[in-house]
Amino acid sequence: MFMFNYDFYYEIYNALYARNYHKWQCTTQAKGVCELILNHEPLSAAQTILDVGCAKGWALQHLQEHGRGVAGIDISERAIKFLKEQDFECCLASAMDIPYEDSSFDLVMSTDVFEHLLPTDVEQAISECYRVASRYLVLQIHTGKSRIRFAAGQWAKSKGLNTLHLTIKPTKWWIEQFTNDRAAEVIFQQGSVFAIEIKRPRQESNL
């Protein structure tokens, strides 16, 4: 069984959220990813979507308003509490251990999350996304260091974290990690955003 340090991520992001990290739902980086999903064929055919690292749920709300069935996971208790108060389906969980059955969603998305993982956890998180997605993955992955400001930044620096981006690699590298030795095809790529179609046998896909 794959083992990862859940407490490592849990401590960091719960402490940061307590210090106004992602305070405002509207300060999301997910707008471009959502527009891609809603307007780009064949992604627009996806009816059920999981957001891995959903924060306070801007993407969930936006996609739900456009008729999609949505769910989210995040490592922050504050984020999940906020979402449950808004009646969203969500779970306190990490990208390395997604609490859903195989092929539960037509599409899995993640916005500026994977760069926050330790290099040793990247492959497991990718495998989990493939496991719960039946047809598509849509990712935005930041390729530079993070800026941590104000109280959240002070806390992070006190813990020796000069950046929250623990795996800093170019988009080409990320695409290779997501596609090497997998039945998958990149169907869109612009900047740090890319979309993958999973080539499952037809009977395993809902689309």
Image (cartoon, grey):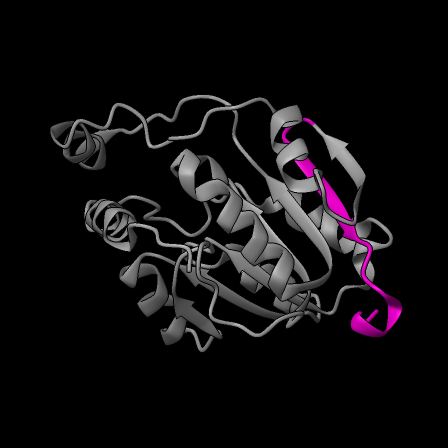
Residue 200 visible, this orientation: yes
**Residue found 34% across the figure and 57% down from its top:** 75
Q: Residue 123 at x, y = what percent?
A: 52, 44
Number of numbered markers: 0
> Horizontally, is 36 left or right of 151 in the view?
right
Q: Is residue 192 shown in magenta? A: yes
**Residue found 44% across the figure and 54% down from its top:** 96
Say which of 191 and 116 sits in front. 116
> Horizontally, is 160 left or right of 203 in the view?
left
Q: Residue 111 at x, y = what percent?
A: 54, 44
> Looking at the picture, does residue 118 appear above or below residue 53?
above
Q: Residue 158 at x, y = what percent?
A: 11, 29
Residue situated furthest left in the rendering: 158
> Looking at the picture, does residue 35 appear above or below residue 66?
above
Q: Which residues are magenta?
A: 191-207
Q: Quadrant of the N terminus?
A: bottom left
Residue 113 visible, this orientation: no
Q: Is residue 115 shown in magenta? A: no
Q: Quadrant of the C terminus?
A: bottom right
Q: Residue 90 at x, y = what percent?
A: 45, 70
Residue situated furthest front in the rendering: 1
Say which of 69 and 103 sits in front. 103
Identify the image quadrant of residue 128.
bottom right
> Horizontally, is 59 left or right of 68 in the view?
left
> Horizontally, is 136 left or right of 101 in the view?
right
**Residue found 43% across the figure and 43% down from its top:** 121
